[in-house]
Amino acid sequence: MGERPTFLIIGAGIAGLTTALAIARAGFDAVIAERAEALSEIGAGIQLSPNAGRVLADLGLDDAIATLALEPRLIDIRDGASGAVLTALPVEAFRQRYGFPYRVIHRADLQKVLADAVKAAHGVTLILGAVLDDVLARDDTLFAKLKGHRGEVMEVAGIIGADGVWSTTRDRVPGARGPVPTGRTAWRTVIPVDNAPASLPTDRVGLWLGPNAHLVHYPIAGGAAVNVVAIIAERWAKPGWNARGDYRLIAERLNGWSPEVRAILAAAATWQRWALNAVDPTGPWSSGATTLIGDAAHAMVPFLAQGAVMAIEDAAVLGDCLAATGGNAEPAFRAYEAQRRQRVTKVWNVANRTGEHYHAEGLTARVRDLALRAAGTRLILMQNDWIYRWRPNGATGETG
Ligand SMILES: Cc1cc2nc3c(=O)[nH]c(=O)nc-3n(C[C@H](O)[C@H](O)[C@H](O)COP(=O)(O)OP(=O)(O)OC[C@H]3O[C@@H](n4cnc5c(N)ncnc54)[C@H](O)[C@@H]3O)c2cc1C
């Protein structure tokens, strides 16, 4: 190994790329091994809440992200059946309260910002088309062998599995929890503004709630298109990310929803459908000099839009723990896991409860709607302070 310890990161998704930047900032080297031959992001859009913005700004990426992301004007929450507005949060309130905006961005744009920073970072190498083949330990030294690149063997100080919900690095962590079907599917499409119906404005995040389903949309690509995702309770578990969704099926699932929602469904040229799986965050994430990060450690349901944000937070904490231990993987990974577990588990559980809330029916839904109408921006944000106030360096943002 050279003078600086080298960490091998498996996977170049949001978790892997951000981790590489945090490791470089801590003063160590990183090699990212990505299975795909080219970087490509699954899904079109991503919401970046202020707690992600803070970490990305610390990594020097705020300007690049601000150029490509949008700050919507409103978050509109509506009843899916009647179309009635339950509440409308001015997004400016996030910037005022948390010091960072609530942004939406095309995933490919976020990935480009991260990948460009990785390319420019000192001591970070991205290897495409490579997976981890084997790990050998000899006299306290760890060697990792990659398959698919040049089959090279490298001396590494630690291995970080950022390989997503279907992680195989997880096999190196005894007792780690694996993916479990959530009984829900995500349906996704992108509608160019030229084809968008009036119910699909580009100045807001729209959230439509209904029994056993909800639909969310927000602008991407500088406002040229709208990302639409519907999450539906249905027992369909075909593995993979890119199965084609049949318009007739989603139209049937959302039968009885308002004409505005039905106009959105009809405007989409194609749908993609994938089954949502989750990984229980309470199992072990680390073993010796191997740890897991992002979805590999704790994939969650997307109701709080915090899965990638948690991966970004993870990366910052992992970098800080490595800095604090002088690059000593085992104590750093233990400290990282200890610092992250409670917060991630809380977010994971609240995401599940939010799903029940969004997909409620009957009396429970009526009570939810009354509460949303009564709450107002200040109360809604106050309830979420513990999520959005988080900052690296040990502060949790918990307000009690
Ligand atoms: C419908 C939906 C909407 C969402 N919206 C939001 C949102 O608005 N905000 C938010 O914060 N989160 C959101 N999420 C969650 C977010 O998408 C994930 O939490 C996030 O993408 C996880 O990133 P990751 O890097 O951990 O994993 P991934 O993005 O899955 O990346 C894993 C990478 O590892 C690679 N890989 C896999 N196996 C191997 C291997 N063996 N060797 C080498 N490489 C490998 C893959 O090719 C991939 O590049 C949403 C999720 C869904 C399903």
Image: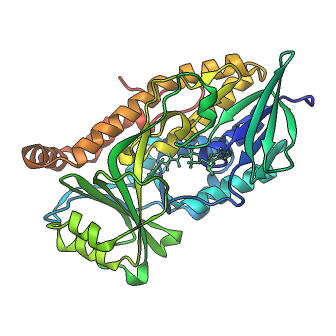
Residue at image location 42% in from the left, 36% down from the top: 387
Outermost bottom residue: 194
| For residue 290, above or below residue 235 | above
Rendered image quadrant of residue 350: top left
Q: Is residue 125 left or right of 90 when viewed as pictured?
A: right
Rendered image quadrant of residue 397: top left
Coordinates of residue 23 in the picture (x, y in percent): 73, 35
Q: Is residue 76 visible?
A: no
Residue at image location 74% in from the left, 25% down from the top: 323
Rendered image quadrant of residue 245: bottom left
Residue at image location 21% in from the left, 52% down from the top: 212
| For residue 217, above or below residue 276 | below
| For residue 185, above or below residue 255 | above
Coordinates of residue 154 in the picture (x, y in percent): 86, 35
Q: Is residue 400 visible?
A: yes
Outermost right residue: 2
Of residue 77 and residue 46, the one placed in the foreground of this image is 46
Of residue 205 and residue 287, the one placed in the foreground of this image is 287
Q: Is residue 314 left or right of 96 when viewed as pictured?
A: right
Coordinates of residue 87 in the picture (x, y in percent): 22, 54
Numbered circles on residues, count: 0
| For residue 21, above or below residue 243 | above
Coordinates of residue 299 in the picture (x, y in percent): 47, 40
Q: Is residue 127 left or right of 318 when viewed as pictured?
A: right
Of residue 381 and residue 335, the one placed in the foreground of this image is 335
Of residue 159 and residue 304, the one placed in the foreground of this image is 159
Image quadrant where one finds the C terminus? top left
